[in-house]
Image: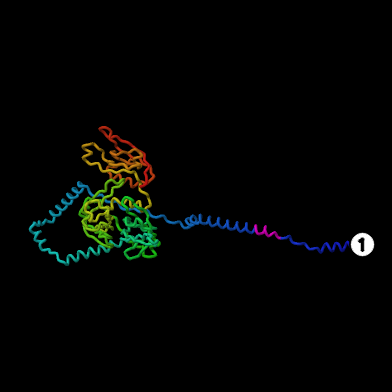
């Protein structure tokens, strides 16, 4: 009897343990969940990297901010009293020198005799024009040709590209970009912009900002990209001169770019008149008219003989002399171009005005300031309650004595800023002070 029990035990011990059957559906489900989680984790990681990478890179390798672009202000001319005093001082010094050394008087007959001995020959003219040619070659290095490309579809849906050109001048570099000022009128519909320098190097550019009143634009290009094509150690940056001198009429000038309606043309002449632009809100632009006979579609840059830019040529000629080359005076543009170069929007108040004359001040007791001739519809000034006939005398307690000073003060403010505007309003036989808090708009 014991033997059967032993056999049973042995049989029990030799039984095989079978593996649990695999559930293929469950395994497939877990595999898909794992793969999905991996994909989701990867997407989250990529998104997090994209978000944090600029922050980390900027922390480890901080990017320098562009330098602020500034242009020198016009030097104030001497008043007639100061000029008279200076001339008297110089005359006194000259008289003292003559008395000390003994003066030699030269009569008119002697002067005429000396001048009659001076005869200009063709060689003198050759030297004159050769000197002007050398001067033009020097200043033209700061000029650039701006080419805009526009794509259109013809009747058969074929793409046609048209090219338009304008001429600009290099005005500044801010450590990151090279900046060019140009008339944007021929380029208004351009899809891409290319700048060509004096050495025939061409680089793509971007529109940085545009002044819709004058249609002048500031274009920019990356200095790193430019350095791949040409040396940027000594960039030919032009100097901005002054067009606001009292003696500007009669100043010799050179027109470069497209004054004759043909690219790379040139014109010599002088400034013959200064024309103020009227009925344009918050601006005080002036036109310099020359005696250079050119194209009605002229463009380019106006230089004086000191190598300074004094105007940007435009075809917006308001006079009846349509073929005379006309340019925007650079003095009134400087602050606007400065803001455009630094990416700041011009403030907008919305008034047109003129200066209060001495006669109006003395005879009609109109206070000195910017006399408001028009208030633009729905402008910040109209919404605040400023009216035609008011005289603006201060902004943020800074005195304003004429319309030019008003535009200068406004150009130093930013859009969105709240300012206190003080005006004098006529009430019966006197002018009474009124103050308005106004949020400046964007031009």
Can residue 305 be seen here? The reply is no
Q: Which quadrant of the figure has residue 32?
A: bottom right
Display coloring = rainbow
Q: Which quadrant of the figure has residue 300?
A: bottom left
Considering every residue shown, the one lying at the far right of the view is 1
| Percent position of residue 285, x then y | 28, 49
1 lies above or below 355? below
87 lies above or below 145? above
- Image-based side of 111 in relation to 39, left or right: left
Q: Is residue 163 magenta?
A: no
Q: Which residues are magenta?
A: 22-29
Question: 109 and 289: which one is in front?
Answer: 289
| Percent position of residue 258, x then y | 27, 60
Residue bearing the label numbered 1: 1
Can residue 235 be seen here? The reply is yes
Q: Is residue 23 magenta?
A: yes
- Image-based side of 247 in relation to 228, left or right: left
| Percent position of residue 308, x then y | 27, 57
Main secondary structure of the magenta stretch: helix
Tell me which residue sits at (21%, 37%) in the image.
363
In what quadrant of the picture does the N terminus appear? Answer: bottom right
Considering every residue shown, the one lying at the far bottom of the view is 123
- Image-based side of 2 in relation to 58, left or right: right
Q: Please, what secondary structure does the residue beneath circle 1 have? A: loop
Tell me which residue sits at (11%, 56%) in the image.
103
Question: 227 and 35: which one is in front?
Answer: 35
């Amino acid at each position: 009897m014991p033997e059967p029990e032993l056999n049973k035990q042995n049989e029990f011990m030799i039984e095989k343990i079978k593996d649990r059957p695999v559930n293929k559906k469950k395994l497939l489900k877990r595999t898909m969940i794992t793969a999905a989680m991996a994909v989701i984790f990867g997407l989250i990681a990529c998104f997090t990297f994209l978000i944090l990478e600029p922050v980390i890179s900027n922390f480890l390798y901080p990017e320098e901010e562009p330098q602020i672009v500034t242009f020198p202000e016009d030097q104030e001319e001497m008043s007639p009293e100061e000029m008279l005093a200076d001339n008297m001082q110089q005359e006194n010094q000259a008289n003292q020198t003559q008395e000390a050394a003994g003066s030699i008087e030269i009569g008119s007959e002697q002067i005429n005799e000396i001048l009659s001995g001076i005869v200009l020959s063709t060689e003198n003219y050759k030297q004159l024009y050769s000197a002007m040619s050398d001067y033009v070659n020097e200043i033209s290095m700061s000029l650039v040709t701006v080419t805009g490309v526009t794509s259109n579809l013809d009747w058969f849906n074929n793409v046609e590209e048209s090219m338009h050109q304008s001429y600009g001048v290099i005005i500044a570099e801010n450590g990151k970009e090279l900046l060019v000022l140009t008339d944007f009128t021929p380029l208004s519909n351009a899809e891409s912009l290319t700048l060509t320098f004096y050495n025939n190097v061409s680089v793509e550019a971007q529109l940085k900002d545009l002044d819709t009143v004058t249609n002048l634009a500031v274009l920019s290009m990356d200095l790193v990209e430019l350095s791949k094509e040409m040396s940027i150690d000594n960039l030919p940056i032009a100097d901005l001169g002054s067009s606001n001198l009292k003696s500007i009429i009669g100043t010799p000038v050179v027109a470069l770019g497209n004054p004759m309606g043909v690219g790379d043309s040139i014109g010599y002449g002088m400034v013959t008149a200064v024309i103020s632009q009227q009925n344009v809100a918050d601006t005080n632009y002036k036109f310099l008219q020359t005696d250079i006979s050119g194209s009605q579609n002229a463009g380019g840059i106006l230089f004086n003989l000191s190598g300074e830019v004094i105007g940007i040529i435009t075809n917006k000629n308001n006079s009846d002399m349509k073929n005379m080359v006309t340019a925007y005076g650079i003095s009134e543009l400087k602050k606007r171009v400065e803001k455009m170069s630094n990416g700041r929007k011009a403030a907008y108040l919305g008034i047109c005005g003129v200066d209060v004359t001495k006669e109006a001040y003395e005879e009609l007791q109109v206070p000195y300031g910017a006399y408001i001739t028009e208030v633009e519809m729905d402008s910040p000034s109209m919404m605040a309650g400023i009216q035609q006939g008011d005289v603006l005398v201060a902004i943020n307690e800074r005195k304003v004595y004429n319309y030019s000073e008003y535009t200068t003060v406004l150009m130093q403010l930013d859009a969105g800023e709240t300012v206190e505007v003080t005006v004098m309003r006529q009430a019966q036989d006197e002018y009474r002070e009124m103050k308005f808090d106004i949020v400046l708009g964007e031009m």
